[in-house]
Image (cartoon, helix red, strand yellow):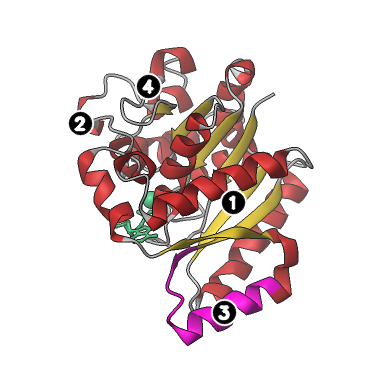
């Protein structure tokens, strides 16, 4: 059975896409059959996987509105080896079109159902909003992975997200739980980051992943080469951290 996870945080620029692409590549490399679902009309996860969003005949948009099957839309990441349900600007239109459809927040869940046996992990890259697209991600998932920077305001934003997840759990998806918080773009030289990191551990205990992703320029450079950071420069500190995170996820799956 595929384990389905949303990478979510309603803030932009917090490392969702970087986490999704690198975790997908690291899991695939570790022998886990992985599907990355790009639910952000910006298509950054698509490009970062080495799939050109400007040349898509079919995208996750067509899947959500019922114009294509998953098998028609999925395409292999040439650099990462995992499968991708790619996205581009067209997906922004789905937001409006979905409103008129039946079971509008369960379209992705339905679409994934028949392909459950094809994957060990499905990772959904959510847009930076609590929109109908994010809702589709949350309804399809077993759990949420929350990447966050250890900044003062990060904790404030977190309570909004936690409340949304609670509501979805209560009303739409009984399976949904928070798998964990991943500290990203971490700079150990900054006292504030150390403090927020310690606070997170105090409040959330073992919901905080052990792996910590440092701020690392090689991770930021990789997308312009159409590669996950873990493929672009596997020895870089950032890549090593994502590989450790993948190992931690595989380990956690045994206890879920
Ligand atoms: P989101 O998907 O939440 O908007 P991204 O993953 O696109 O965030 O990251 C925002 C920016 O920060 C991107 O330019 C990305 O390359 C960069 N970035 C992400 N993680 C790191 C990191 N650990 N070190 C350095 N840069 C990073
Ligand atoms: Mg993103």
Of the residues under marks 3 and 1, which one precedes in the sequence? 1
Mark linked to residue 196: 3
Contact? badges 2 and 1 (CB < 8 Å): no
Q: Is residue 234 visible?
A: yes
Residue at the front extreme?
235
Kindly identify which residue carries mark 4.
76
| Secondary element at tag 4 | strand
Is 46 within the magenta? Answer: no
Give the CA distance from mark 3 to mark 4: 38 Å
Kindly identify which residue carries mark 1.
145
Of the residues under marks 3 and 2, which one precedes in the sequence? 2
Kindly identify which residue carries mark 2.
54
Q: Nearer the viewer, residue 32 or 139?
A: 32
Which residues lie in the magenta part? 184-201
User: Does ligand 1 reach within 8 Å of label 3's beta carbon?
Assistant: no
| Secondary element at tag 1 | strand
């Amino acid at each position: 059975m595929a384990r389905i996870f949303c990478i979510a945080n309603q803030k932009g620029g917090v490392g969702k896409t970087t986490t999704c692409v690198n975790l997908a590549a690291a899991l695939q490399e570790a022998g886990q059959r992985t599907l990355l679902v790009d639910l952000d009309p910006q298509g950054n996860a698509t490009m970062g996987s080495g799939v050109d969003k400007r040349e898509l005949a079919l995208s996750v948009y067509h899947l959500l509105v019922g114009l294509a099957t998953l098998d028609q839309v999925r395409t292999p990441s040439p650099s990462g080896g995992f499968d991708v349900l790619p996205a581009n600007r067209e997906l922004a239109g789905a937001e409006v079109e979905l409103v008129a459809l039946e079971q509008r927040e369960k379209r992705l869940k339905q679409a994934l159902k028949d392909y459950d046996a094809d994957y060990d992990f499905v990772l959904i890259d959510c847009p930076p909003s609590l929109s109908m697209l994010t809702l589709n991600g949350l309804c399809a998932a077993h759990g949420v992975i929350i990447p966050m920077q250890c900044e003062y305001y990060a904790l404030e934003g977190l309570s909004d997200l936690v409340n949304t997840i609670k509501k979805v759990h209560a009303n739409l998806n009984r399976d949904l739980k928070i798998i964990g918080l991943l500290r990203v773009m971490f700079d150990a030289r900054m006292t504030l980051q150390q403090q927020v990191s310690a606070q997170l551990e105090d409040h959330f205990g073992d919901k905080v992943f052990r792996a910590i992703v440092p701020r690392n320029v090689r991770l930021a450079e990789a997308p312009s080469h159409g590669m996950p950071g873990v493929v672009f420069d596997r020895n870089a500190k950032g890549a090593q951290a994502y590989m450790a995170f993948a190992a931690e996820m595989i380990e956690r799956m045994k206890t879920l």
